[in-house]
Amino acid sequence: MNTFTKLACTAAATALIAGAALADGHAQKWDMPMAYAATNFHSEQGVVFADKVREYTNGAIDITVHPGGSLFGGGDIKRAVQTGQVNIGERFMSAHANEAPLLGWDNLPFLATTYADNAKLWEAAKGPVNAQLADLNMVTLYSCAWPGQGFYFAKEVGSSADTQGVKFRSYNSATATFAEELGMIPVQIEAAELAQALATGVASSFISSGSTGYDQKVWEHLSHYYKVNAWLPRNYVVANKQAWEALDDETRAGVMKAADETAAACNAKSEELADFYFAELEKNGMTVTDASPEFLAELEVIGAKMTAEWLETAGADGQAIIDAYKAMK
Ligand code: PCA
């Protein structure tokens, strides 16, 4: 067989297998909105995932990644997937904990502060959380943790005496509550708009990982980062339920294989990069330190209150997640 014939045979075979995915035999093109910078590890892993999906489904599903909120802004991605405007997307689901309290499981202060513990907590949470997402018409393909969350400020902060009246960028209601407890004034803003919010004075502090501070070059506006390591929140890559159910078993298995591999790679990448981000913040002039014992003690008291409030809204399912997690430790 010459090269051309071989290629033609491979293409024909691929087309045949790909045909398994759709009744009309064409590959499906799926647009995948992602909310964070193209160079962020979540987005880069999204591209790796798309490549793996093409490979493991023999080209049946062809995903195009749209990072940086370019197709849908972060706040609109969940609805876009739910309603089938897109078949797949990435979302920071704890931002929707006011609609579905269970989705706040990954914002519980000081409960699981290492990658190993965060993986255990996800193990404990994923049954009820994925059931909740299924109720919202979404199928979870994979989730990936951000590095630990700490506070960014434009000044030295030793305790809540220094945070009164400070304008704070929140990314969900849990972080807004945290800020209010510290006397700050929260406003919810997507990461993609963070640099602009800092530049215009809409906010002068926020809680996040070193990753987002690095992506948004926040050293241009802020001076201090306190490594509180309060929690490791997660992004989820989810599919629209009808789009998912329309796939044949073999194609779904290919997508899940890609998803499982990407989950492992993405979480490993997050852990590997955590200290790199701190070094970059420092290199660009920021002071990166642990929070003072006084500030940390205050944050722990607030954290306990937030966990109690979450349990009130998340109910028995929430308690079951915490219990199952503690049983694993
Ligand atoms: N970065 C995202 C979510 C958590 C994180 O570390 C953000 O600040 O929006």
Image (tube, rainbow, N blue to C red):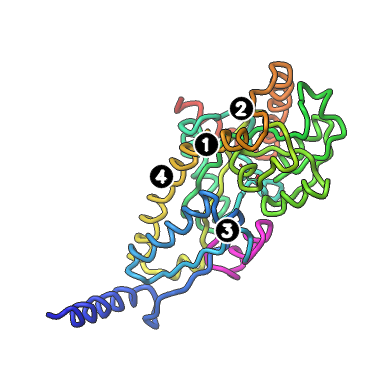
Q: List the residue tagged with mark 2.
A: 110
Name the secondary structure under disc 2. loop
Q: Quadrant where the N terminus lies?
A: bottom left
Q: Distance between the residues labelled 4 and 1?
A: 19 Å
Badge 1: few (under 14), some or many (20 or more) residues near its Cα, within 10 Å?
A: some
Choose the circle earlier in sequence order: 1 or 3: 3
Q: Nearer the viewer, mark 1 or mark 2?
A: 1
Quarter of the rendering containing residue 105? top right
Q: Magenta segment: does it hold 72?
A: yes
Q: Residue drawn at (64%, 29%), measured in percent from left and top?
A: 288
Q: Where is residue 205 in the image (x, y as percent from the top left)?
A: 76, 38
Q: How far apart are marks 4 and 2 (CA)?
A: 23 Å
Q: Is residue 106 left or right of residue 64?
A: right
Q: In the image, which residues are magenta?
A: 71-89
Badge 4: few (under 14), some or many (20 or more) residues near its Cα, within 10 Å?
A: few
Name the secondary structure under disc 1. helix
Name the secondary structure under disc 4. helix
Q: Residue drawn at (66%, 45%), measured in percent from left and top?
A: 217
Ligand 1 lies in quarter: top right
Q: List the residue tagged with mark 4.
A: 264
**Which amino acid lies under the numbered mark 4 shown in the image of this protein?**
Ala
Q: How far apart are marks 2 and 3 (CA)?
A: 28 Å
Q: Position of residue 141 (x, y in %)?
A: 47, 55
Q: In this view, does 65 lie to the left or right of 80?
A: left
Asked if marks 1 and 3 touch (Cβ < 8 Å), the reply is no
In the rendered view, would you say 86 is above or below 210?
A: below
